[in-house]
Amino acid sequence: MKVFAISALALLTSMVSAAPAPAPAAAGAAPYQIGITFIGAAEGRFTQYFFTNGQGSSIYDRLSVSKIANPGGATCYFYGIDGSFTVVPSGATVDVGPPQTQTYGYCYA
């Protein structure tokens, strides 16, 4: 019985040590983000950062948005509180019609 237990332990140890180690993350590395500017009436505006890997983010600013400006680096997609869906290509400023509060967005590089 001792020999069996030692053999089983040796087998399990070799299986664990044979597994490849995960690649180390680069120090300080984070997914790339871009700052999207939401523009409302009377030049009211705010900027929010979005990851460019498709990870969505909620938008909490209640400004009624009439334009969305994308500095470049990804194409972004936004949903408005009243049902709008706005695609903002890289490097473009796009009208939101009709103007409305934006609630959710995501970007892909």
Image (cartoon, rainbow, N blue to C red):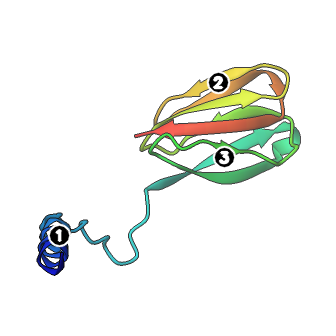
Position of 106 with respect to 90 (left or right) is right
Q: Is residue 46 above or below residue 96?
A: below
Q: Which residue is mark 3?
A: 37
| Amino acid found under the numbered disc labelled 3 | Thr
Circle on res. 8 = 1
For marks 1 and 2, the one nearer the N-term is: 1
Query: Looking at this view, is 65 or 85 the one in front?
Result: 85
Circle on res. 97 = none
Alpha carbon distance from label 3 to label 2: 13 Å
Alpha carbon distance from label 1 to label 3: 61 Å
Position of 27 with respect to 58 (left or right) is left
Q: Residue furthest front?
A: 1
Q: Residue 17: x percent and y percent?
A: 16, 72
Q: Residue at x 71, y 32 (%)?
A: 67
Q: Identify the image quadrant of residue 56.
A: top right
Q: Residue 2: x percent and y percent?
A: 17, 80
Q: Nearer the viewer, mark 1 or mark 3?
A: 1
| Amino acid found under the numbered disc labelled 2 | Thr
Q: Residue 37: x percent and y percent?
A: 66, 46
Q: Nearer the viewer, mark 1 or mark 2?
A: 1
